Every structure is written in structure tokens, then in C-alpha cells.
Amino acid sequence: MQNQNSKFKIEDKFISRKNLKKVLGELLKSSRLIAPVSVYGEIVFQEVKSVEAIVFEYENCLNAPKDYMLSNDEVLFKYSAKSSRIKKDKASDTPLVIFGSRPCDTKAIGLLDKFFSRTFEDPLYFSKRKNTLIITLACRKLGRNCFCTSTKSGPCLENGFDVQLIDIGEGFYLEARSSRGRDFIKRFSNLISNSDIKKKKEKEIAIKKAVESKKTEFDLKKVYDNLDKSNTEDDFWEDLSERCQSCGGCLLICPTCSCFHIIDKKINGKEGNRLRSLDACYYEGFTRMAGGYNPTSPRPEMMRRKFYHKLWQEVGEFGEAGCTGCGRCNEICPGNINWLENIKKIEKRLA
Amino acid sequence: MFNRDLYIPRIASIKGIKGLTPDTKLFRITFTKKDAELSREHDFLPGQFVQVSVFGRGEVPISIASSPEDKEEMGLSVRRVGFVTDALHKLKPGDKIGIRGPYGNHFPIEDIQSRHFLFVGGGCGLAPLRSLIRYMANNRKKFQKLTILYGARTSGDILFKDELYSMRESKEADVNLSVDCGPADALCSVGVVTTLFKKFNNLKGSAAFICGPPAMLHFVVKELLNLSVGEEDIILSLERYMKCGVGKCGHCYIKNKYVCTDGPIFSYRELKELGLEL
């Protein structure tokens, strides 16, 4: 028994449901805790003040945890009206813990990490990110709108997370794959126990069950290749964009979207703040220049731009899709466009 | 970089303002005294731009129009066309603005093997080209043959008119000017800038640097290809709406290239690969 246990890496552990609640209670004392809660019948990520408020049984939250890394009205700096002084706020030192992030959302944040360190490192993003611990909750099955198996971002992650919990009935199989995750295990070593062969087997069965709960929808490589080869097909994009209202919903709710706009906002007669907020590339003025020239107009062009960015550029540059299959855009679209169905069309039609 | 923090500008002072045309002004900028040392260390190269802030209004990308060898001050040619540039035009010498940068890539003059350098500008597109023109004109040993083809709407809209006329006088460059609407004079003809190509029948081996309105780019590239200029030797400076200038806000990318970090300078061949219809 001793020999078999020593085969496991130190990061594979087990935690009972009761102990998990105790861990969360401890975390509340020293960090801001973001967890799924029920608000007017919807499950959303929100800051909690007590463990009782946390929901453990849910498909996914309406908002993505990315909202805590990239929020609206982030202050870049404060300026004075005579512009002879600029003041930058000190970043908050309170650690942030996000509990209950699904694998698709965690993978999305991993993608944002890569994006925000590309070319120049974004100081605002990383000042929040370095203080954040994400506890991922693997899925038992794919949800109604989910397609994470096609984008290789779920229902369970192999790496790219701090701590991942996989439900095996009597508790959770606990994995750590980062130094933050390993510190977490050390810190709560009194509430986290060792794993064993039986539990590992149960974990593998749970993952297999989740993966097989829904068939894969498309082959990402094929979609990439099709987009790579085709440069025209204007009528295809026109067809896709017919029902788009440019509401921006799909982009504002997407866990991997990060485009932002910056405005200067007055506080009083003497000072103001330069703020950055999330932006959406489907908004009409997104690429419009002061003289009126708009290189990405009309709407079919914008649609083509988004597909290429998420399914071709990011795949080519980062090796992973800019879409993690969470399905939120399908939930929210007022025009019933269905992003997933369109990806399948690209896989089949553009060839 | 002139600025230490990615999103926080360095404060600069407007040393002087010169009206170039009814809607364009040249702002001569210096950094505040204690930062002067820092600004000399962080040089820029022709083709790069800075993000200019008018605090309370916003920030816009403006090409640097002065030569990097001009260490005392930096020249920014700004056309009044929108919300921020309008506020910029209302400022006076002594007023403070914010500068972030220099950002973007630069005109690839190290790689160019040719002897003949062609500058094709339209309207306010002459601004980034001027940085390169002045740099090359001050280094005549390396850059011997300079030809400028520049078109503006009317005679009053010709940017850096005095400099262009004096370059023609001193034969520093072969300066050819055209205006869309007359009257013509001894120094400039009437017609779009492409009419200035008539005097050439072969430009093989030349390098062309182009900047101007989108419609102009299309026709100029066509002329250059007809005159046997190679696709890698046709260099364009593109303009796009930018917010951050550092490849993060997502407004300026074309397929997989961010105009603010991978550009704004692209060769015609690169743009073809991007599928950009000029």
C-alpha cells in the first residue's frame, strides 16, 4: 500500500465535502472570495461573505470569472486638469480566490494570461492576476450549450490551472498544477488528505463519463485549415450576419474576449480619471476612424473578423482556440445566431 | 519608451506651434527638464508614432514627423479631424500634454538595398514620411537619390511647403507636387498624385515609401507595380483607429497583425498575405 501511494505526485490529493466548506471558510478570513451564488434564480459569480451562500450544484454561471480580471471602469491613472501631475493608484494587496470556475472559464483566463503578456506585458491585468487563486470545479457532464470537448477546454483540464476539483461522490479528487496550487495544499494540509488508487480510478471514471456525455461537435484543426485556405466567400459571411443586431452581448459575456476602450472621465473641475472598460468588436464604430473611414464595415466583415480572430489567429499564435466552448454566447444572442452551428458550417462548407 | 509604465504617459510641454495648413498644425514638443535625460536615451526610428494625450479629452496616435537626430524637440503634425485633435488644436505653447511611446515598427531602411528612394505622400500622409525624408536628407552619403511625389487637395493644403520648396531649390531631393484642384503654378501641377508618375518609365530597383488616404494607396501601388517596383520594396504606413497603441485593445488588428505593434509599416507583399484590399 505504501509503495503504490508513493507513485503519485504530491499534487494529487482528496478533500471531503465537509472539509472543502471548512477550507472556503478559512479563505474568507484572509481573501476576497468569489463563488457561484443564486441571485433571482440565476447562478452568477459574486463576492461572498459566508460559505452558506455558495452554490455547489450548477451547470455554469451566467457571468465568467474573467469579469474579476478585466472589469469595467478600471482606473489607469488620475490626472489633474492642468495635466502637470499624474497619479496612479496602488493595486489592492488583498488576495482574490475564485471558487467554482469551470474548466472552460479557467482555460479562458489562461488564454488571457498569454494574450496580456504578448509583445508588452499589461501591468493592470497582472497586478490583479498575480494575487488570484482559481479553484476549478470540473464538470460532471456537458451542459445544454457546451462544446468544450471540441475546443479541447473541458470537461476536465490536464494542466493550466491552480487547483482542480473532480467530484467522485464522497468528496473531490484534488489536483494542483501550479506553485499557487501547491501552496494551497500546504496551507490546508490538515483538511486535505492523500489520494489512493481507488480514488484515482473513480476520478478517471468520472472524467470519462463527462467526456462521453455529449458528442464532439467539430474538429478544431479542420476549422482552422478551412479558415486558413479561404479568403473570400463573402456571401457566407453575409448569410451568417443577417440576424446580428450588433448588441455586443456575445462579446461582453465571452470569457476570452478582452477588447477594451479607454475614456477620460471628469471627477470634478480639477481632476479626472482615465478609465478602461470592455468593448465589443461588433459595435458599429469599433474600427471607425475620425475622418469617417471604417475598414471593417459592414457587418459581414465584422463577423469574419471575429471568427478569424478566435478560430484562426489565436489557434495559430497560442496553439489553442480563442473559444473555450462555454456556450454563453448562444444563451444570450437575441438574434439566435448560434456561434457553434456557424463553426460547424465553416468546418463543412468552406473547403 | 518615453514612459515608464505602459499606460501612463510622460508629461511633455508644447514648445511651439506652427500652422501648416488651415486644418493642420505642427507641434514642437519637449519633455520636462528632469526627464530630458531619459528622453534622449529612448530614441525612436522614422515611421514610429506616439500616443498623444489631451487630459480630459482622450488620446490619439500621431506619427512622429521629426527626424530622430533632432534631439532637442519632437515634431508632431496633427490634423484637426476629431474630438481629441480638435482639443489639441486649441492648446497654446507652454501647455502640457501626455506622450506614450514610441510605438510601432519603423521604415525598414537597414534592409533596403536600393539606391533610389521614392516618397509618395497624400494629404497629411506626408507627416510620417517627413521623419524619414529628413533623416535621409541628413545622411546623403548613404541615401543619395531621393524623389518626393506629394499630392494635396489645394495649394493651401500642402504640408511643410517651405521645406519642400527649399529641398527642391537646394536639389536635396527631386520634389514633385500636385494639387487636386488648381490653380497650378510653376512649382506644382494639377491632378491627383498618380499623375506625377508620368515622368517615369521604369523604377526597377527603387524602394517606395507611401502614406496617404486609403483610396490613394490603391492607385499608387498599381502605378508602382506597373513601373516594376518589387512587392517587398513597396512600403506603406497604414492608419487605423487605436486606443492603447500596444496591441491589447483589439481595435487595430488586421487578421493576425496588430497595426500598432506589427505595423504601422507594412510591405505590399505582407498586406497581400493579409488579404487586405487596398
Image: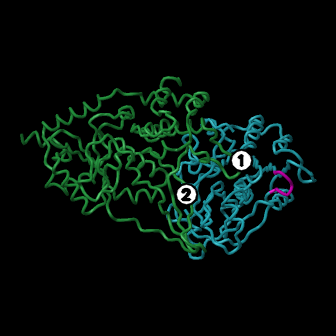
| Amino acid found under the numbered disc labelled 2 | Ile
Is residue B223 visible in the rendered image? The answer is: yes
Counting from the top left corner in percent of width and height, residue A298 is at 63, 38
| Residue B209, numbered label | 1
Structural crowding at the residue carrying mark 1, measured as other residues with C-alpha within 10 Å and reported as few (<14), some (14–19) or many (≥20): many
Magenta segment? B152-158
The quadrant the N terminus of chain B occupies is bottom right
Instruction: Tell me if residue B156 comes above or below residue B213 in the rendering.
Output: below
Counting from the top left corner in percent of width and height, residue B195 is at 85, 42
Labels 2 and 1 touching (C-beta < 8 A): no
In three-dimensional space, the C-alpha distance between marks 2 and 1, rounded to whole angstroms, equals: 32 Å
Name the residue beneath numbered marker 2. Answer: A262
Output the letter for the chain in green. A
| Residue A324, numbered label | none
Q: Secondary structure at mark 1?
A: strand
Chain containing the residue with disc 1: B
Instruction: Tell me if residue B193 comes above or below residue A201 in the rendering.
Output: below
